[in-house]
Image (cartoon, helix red, strand yellow):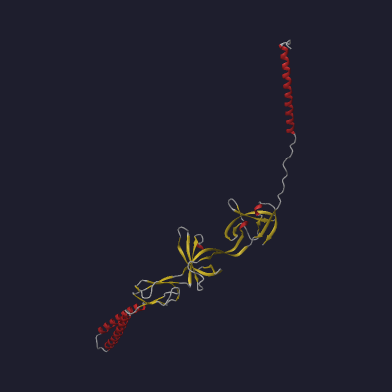
Amino acid sequence: MSGQSPKTRTARTSNRWLRRNAIKAVIILVAIAALVAITKMPARNRVAPPTKAAPVNVTVITVAAEPEFVDTFELPAVVEPNRVVTVSAEIDGRIEKIPCKEGCPIRAGQLLTELNTDLIRPAFEIAEAQVKRDRIEFERMKNLVEDDATPRRDLDDATTRLAISQAQLEEVGARLERTRILAPIDGVLNELLIEKGEYVQAGMPVGVIVETDMVKVVVEVPERDIAFFAVGQKAGVSVNVKDRDRSLAGTITFISGLADEQTRCTRMELTFENKERLLRSGQIVSVNLTRRVLKDAVLIPLLAVIPMENSKAVYVVNSTKADRRDVELGIIKGNRIQVTQGLEPGDRLIVSGHRFVAPGQKVNVVSESK
């Protein structure tokens, strides 16, 4: 090996390099040719053919309009007495008699208490006697004037004296009458504020009478609803008496002109007859109020409505396909809601399965009601 010349070694090294690179070049050319051949081959259709969606089973109802729909709602309310009257003494005096007891029924004009008259009755008898005397003098002067036996001035003086004595008699008689303190209204003597023998002064309260034959039911109506009501309208109240629900009819008698600044509700009073004593002051009841009566109202199940991003929609069956309708809604009554636009009587509304359909999708009606 050592005898080989440098030129010979260089030539062998060059041959080996050429063979290695030639093999690599052949491999690369074969790979390029295979790749080109593969790209020129017809592409295999790898997309699966579309499959048809199966019909969705749905339940359908036929939309119908109600000839008259009463828009009512309930609110809690509180029973209050129709009137609470505090009866006071009108003159000074000592309590002589108290014929009534607390809690007993009272009629207008009935005696509540009587004051002592020992100081007033003599004054009344004196005034009464003076009237009789002045009337006799008046008649005498009248006859004398007619006979021209006395000047007319004497008749004028007699007339004046008679008028004064009659006024004094009326004043003392009014004081005597006011020793009998009478009930001004029908009701119940709810509170007695005096005792027999007690001395009262004019203006001092002696008793409180609560009217019970008529009561007020006070309800706070939200501002969005108060415009539907007016004085004189009818309303109902539901009350539970001895575990039995009773319904009573009343009338709106007052609507406040001012709303509460915090709750934005308006006080409304309804008056009810209460001769059976079914309603008691402070009792909480339910008031049934009617906002309005709608003609030809279309109401559908609330669950049939699908909330959309900016609207509400329902699905109806058109032939065998689902058709989406955008709707405008009104009042809610229980589990039903009013549709003001978007549906017409006779439309076949999907009420079950509607959340699994899309516009134009075929449906299979499994149940239908009218």
Image position, residue 362 (x, y; %): 70, 53
Tell me residue 161's x, y (percent).
Answer: 28, 82
Q: Nearer the viewer, residue 240 or 80?
A: 240
| Towards the viewer: 269 or 257 | 269
Quadrant of the rendered image containing residue 370:
bottom right
Q: Residue at x 68, y 60 (%)?
A: 368
Q: Is residue 218 left or right of residue 306?
A: left
Give the percent coordinates (x, y) of residue 35. 73, 31
136 relative to 274, above or below: below
- Residue 82: give x, y in percent of width and height: 46, 70
Who is closer to the viewer here, 288 or 180? 180
Q: Is residue 312 left or right of residue 113?
A: right
The image quarter containing residue 43 is top right
Q: How many marks?
A: 0
The N terminus - image quarter: top right
In this rendering, position of residue 286 left or right of residue 165: right
- Image position of 36 (left or right of 144): right
